[in-house]
Amino acid sequence: MSMLAKLSALFRGTAHEAGQSVVDANALKILDQEIRDADNAQGKARDDLAGLVARRRMAENEMKSFGDQIAKYESSARTALAQGKADLAREVAQRIAELETEIGSRGPLIENMKAAEARLRSAIATTDQKIETLRREIDIVKVNDSVQKAQTSVALQSAGAHSRIGSAADSLQRIKQRQAVNEEKLRAGQELEDKRTGADLDAKLKEAGILPGQASADDVLARLTAQEIKVVTPLIETSAPVSKDPA
């Protein structure tokens, strides 16, 4: 195979694959359009059937009219014969013969029209059933396609959510680490400030009970009790009775 032939085959193969990919990607749209085309064709078939039925009924009405005319002319022919009017009776008989010929020729045509109607009705009914079955299958395919798209979207969103959660957790950990570092910096700064002012030494002395610290509730109650005793004692001494010497 020449290089040109190979390139041509490659081009045709690539075009076929590209075309098939486009068809597959738009399969549901194509099916919907094909269903619409089939519905349009069915509508045309129904119109044709309606026209055929109308023509057949018109032919049947003409046949009935021919039969009514034959009955009328036969009565007229008998009357003409009874009156001895042979020429007129022959003329009426000629008309009857023409009507019978029309009936004879149109009878098979009407039967053929009836048979065509039956075939067309059957074909329309069969096609309607096929279209309806295909439409139901397309609906199922559409539902499955929607479900699969939703599942794919959920899976992608879930993966994205896990990624975002991991990123948020990392950010949270970095914030905690930064806060811990800042807290240590503040603690170290406060320790340096306490050493500079001697506050750390005062705290150690207070804890050892060497440097007076903040009074407790027990201390306050003890002080108040002592003050109360000091106030009450002079009053007792002042109100005591003076004893008289019996001598």
Image (cartoon, helix red, strand yellow):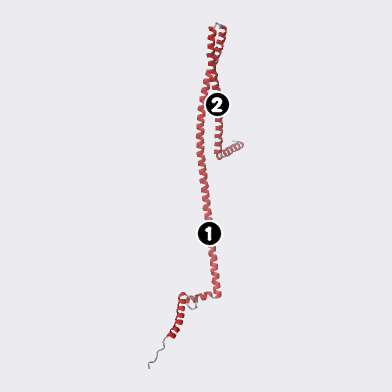
Q: For the N terminus, which image quadrant?
A: top right
Relative placement, left or right, of 3 versus 208 is right
Residue found 54% across the figure and 13% down from its top = 72
Residue found 57% across the figure and 8% down from its top = 88
Q: Nearer the viewer, mark 2 or mark 1?
A: 2
Residue holding disc 1? 172
Q: Determine the secondary structure under disc 2.
A: helix
Taking the view exactly as shown, the residue that stands out farthest to the right is: 4
Q: Amino acid at mark 1?
A: Leu
Q: Amino acid at mark 2?
A: Ala
Image coordinates for residue 59, horizontal then vertical, percent: 55, 20
Up-down relation of residue 235 to residue 12 (above or below): below
Q: Are marks 2 and 1 in contact (CB under 8 Å)?
A: no
Taking the view exactly as shown, the residue that stands out farthest to the left is: 246
Q: Residues within 10 Å of mark 2 (few under 14, many from 20)?
A: few
Residue holding disc 2? 50
Q: Residues within 10 Å of mark 1 (few under 14, many from 20)?
A: few
Up-down relation of residue 124 to residue 73 (above or below): below
Give the mark, 2 or 1, whose residue is nearer the N terminus: 2
Image coordinates for residue 21, horizontal then vertical, percent: 56, 40
Image coordinates for residue 42, horizontal then vertical, percent: 54, 30
Question: In front: 31, or 79?
Answer: 79
Up-down relation of residue 17 to residue 217 (above or below): above
Up-down relation of residue 184 to residue 6 (above or below): below
Question: In front: 67, or 214?
Answer: 67
Taking the view exactly as shown, the residue that stands out farthest to the top is: 84
